[in-house]
Image (cartoon, helix red, strand yellow):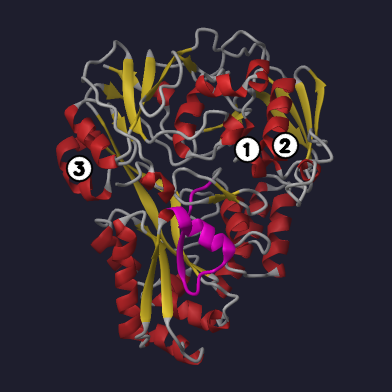
Amino acid sequence: MTSLRDAGPRRGARGKVAALAAVALAASLGLSACGGSGKKSDGVFTVGHSEPDHLVPGNTTSSYSFDVLSGLFDNLEGLTKDGKAYNLAAESISTTDQKVWTIKVRGGQKFHNGEPVTAQSFADAWNNAAYGPNAYSANDYFSHIQGYDAMNPEDEKAKPKADKLSGVQVVDPSTLKVTLTAPFNQFPLLLTYPAFAPMPKAGLQDPKSFENHPIGNGPYMMSGNWERNKQIKLVPFPGYTGPRKPKNKGVIWKSYSSADSAYTDLRAGKIDVLQTIPAAKVPEAKRLLGDRFLPRKMGTMDYLGFPLWDKRFANPDLRKAISMVIDRQGINKAVYNGDYFPADSLLPSIIEGHRANACGELCTFDPAKAKTLFDKAGGFKGTLELYFSNAQPTYYQWMQIVANSLKQNLGIQDIQFRQVPASDYFSMLNKRTEKGPYRQNWEADYPSAQNYLENMWASDANRMGWKSKEFDDLIAKANSSADHQQALQFYNQAEDVAIREMPMIPLWTWAGQGGRSSHVDNVTITAFSTGLLVNEVTVK
């Protein structure tokens, strides 16, 4: 059984792991597919996905929850199809120093229960999500804001010194003043993350009822309650005044435990959209669906990390040698039908700041040069253990190819696979108990070079145990720069430092492969947290 949209674990701003349901854990969910009669409601369409974990915006990092929340809520900032931030619930967002931000909330907005959307609606929601004792899964995303530490003491048993973010001030009903811990020019992009949605008073007073029937400010509202392990029905909100007005009469998010079952229902016309078709079914889907097969680039990248606390991996030349004996093109063809994108950078091509061939020869299959670097590093002694989870059969397939290349080209004969249950894998990485290279991947929280580089390589955030003041200083310069192009230059310089050291090897970027029925049109699935642009879908 596989996840319908498998993606990597995410870390919050301070490097803690967030419980992204789109990781391999989704593969172990004991949900049952909800059958359908195939009968279509006039103007309503059905999308297959995995069951969400929560529907309170601040208490989820699951892409399956985001599917639903993106229709129910308007954040202050939205994302265009190409990943640019634009004002959504906000009228304007401004700063003079990248640290203190003034946010004007667009007037005339209402929640689905008629309550006005104000600056206080956002402040209350953020305070609720950031308050440590609430144990919300998206808590870390508020750590850029002053006062977060007072709400989240290091000793989790200690009582917080505050229950509100000191950096969030309600100036008047339509104005928020937000003070960050340090200059951060990516703040508007951060505000696109679902955790920053507003909450009505009713949701804060009765979170349990709100979970079953979320009350948002977005283009869609709930039709009935969440039918757990079955479906969630959304219909257009008549009082919506924003720019995302629905072009249909509603959407049903139908829960599946198996991507294969969902794909079977797509073929049978029982659902209208599937965002990720199982890899093994892709060749068939291309043939059967024709122009209804929906390929797309994605921002999810696979990497191979090194446990640098183990001195056997301390030499960068060894790490570079391993990178250069990985035949990315060959693996792509053999395992992923040639549909994935071999990495040439630490950033995927859809992220601004990506530079073609930034990784150069270090990401190019060259066994001869690799052996020279390997010998220069003194070779490798002992058992080489390769770690990966059991979430997808493709992980084992490409690890076999990597192992064979290491044996043939570098002469490392003692190689052992360590295939770890998905439910234990990221816990193992957090505890740093692995003894060899390990598979990791990353899906952006928001489309920014910073979100990849700082969260994956910064000294206080990365899993490898890599420390680089040079890298950290460049990231800080990039974050604080008021000039967009200058910031990108600093991010790229930081990327060059990480490539030079190669504590983690970039492998490939995933390809999104979805499909639609003949019942719908204008189906766009983005590479970002917005996913399917539900409001743009038209029903025939």
Name the quadrant containing residue 453: bottom right
Decide which of tag 1 and tag 3 comes sooner along the chain.
Answer: 1
Residue 439: where, in percent of width, then height? 44, 63
> Marks 1 and 2: CB-CB under 8 Å?
yes
SS at badge 2:
loop
Residue 181: where, in percent of width, then height? 79, 46
On the picture, is 166 further left or further right than 384?
Answer: right
Does the stretch in magenta take in 387?
A: no
The residue that disc 3 covers is: 286
Magenta extent: 423-444
Residue at x 53% of width, y 80% of height? 313
Of residues 153 and 499, the one drawn nearer to the viewer in this rendering = 153
Q: Is residue 470 visible?
A: yes
Three-letter code for the amino acid on which mark 1 is drawn: Tyr
SS at badge 1:
loop
The CA span between labels 1 and 2 is 8 Å
Residue at x 67% of width, y 64% of height? 459
Above-or-below relation of 379 to 16: below
Above-or-below relation of 276 to 56: below
The residue that disc 2 covers is: 131
Name the quadrant containing residue 246: top left
Above-or-below relation of 308 to 202: below
